[in-house]
Image: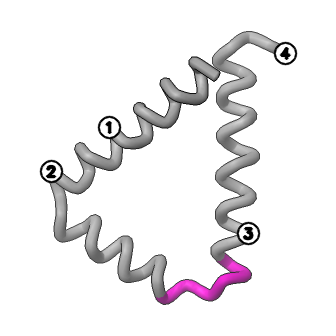
């Protein structure tokens, strides 16, 4: 559970840095995401989740 909370904190920190440093690009990205069809968003989300699990697995040395 500690790792999950740490990862969630890291996500918030990275998003905060993005919105603080380049807000115009962040707004464009959010607008683009809002216009993306749901099926494509699901595919992107699934791909991101799989990539994230693989990266964590490699970083933790569990392979």
Label of residue 43 in the image: 3
Mark 1 and mark 4 lie on one chain; the one further toward the N terminus is 1
Residue count near mark 2 (Cα–Cα under 10 Å), binned few <14, some 14–19, many ≥20: few
From the viewer's perspective, is residue 37 above or below residue 47? below
Q: How far is disc 3 from disc 1 in space, using C-alphas?
A: 25 Å
Mark 3 and mark 1 lie on one chain; the one further toward the N terminus is 1
Mark 2 and mark 1 lie on one chain; the one further toward the N terminus is 1
Mark 3 and mark 2 lie on one chain; the one further toward the N terminus is 2
Look at mark 1 in the image and give the residue it sits on. Answer: 13
SS for tag 3? helix
Residue count near mark 1 (Cα–Cα under 10 Å), binned few <14, some 14–19, many ≥20: few
Q: How far is disc 1 from disc 4 in space, using C-alphas?
A: 28 Å
Q: How far is disc 3 from disc 2 in space, using C-alphas?
A: 28 Å
SS for tag 4? loop
Residue at 73 percent across and 69 percent down: it is 43
Q: How far is disc 2 from disc 1 in space, using C-alphas?
A: 12 Å
Find out whether the residues at labels 3 and 4 contact each other: C-beta distance under 8 Å: no
Label of residue 21 in the image: 2
Q: Which residues are magenta?
A: 35-40
SS for tag 1? helix
Main SS, magenta residues: helix
Mark 3 and mark 4 lie on one chain; the one further toward the N terminus is 3
Locate residue 20, reporting x and y percent. 15, 51
Q: Is residue 17 left or right of residue 63?
A: left
Locate residue 22, reporting x and y percent. 17, 58
Q: How far is disc 2 from disc 4 in space, using C-alphas?
A: 36 Å
Residue at 64 percent across and 22 percent down: it is 1
Mark 2 and mark 4 lie on one chain; the one further toward the N terminus is 2
Q: Is residue 9 on the magenta stretch?
A: no
Residue count near mark 3 (Cα–Cα under 10 Å), binned few <14, some 14–19, many ≥20: few
Find out whether the residues at labels 1 and 4 contact each other: C-beta distance under 8 Å: no
Label of residue 63 in the image: 4
């Amino acid at each position: 559970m500690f790792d999950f909370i740490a990862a969630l904190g890291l996500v918030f920190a990275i998003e905060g840095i993005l919105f603080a440093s380049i807000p115009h690009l962040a707004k464009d990205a959010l607008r683009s995401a809002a216009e993306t069809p749901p099926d494509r968003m699901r595919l992107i989300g699934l791909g991101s989740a799989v990539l994230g699990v693989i990266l964590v697995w490699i970083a933790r040395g569990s392979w």
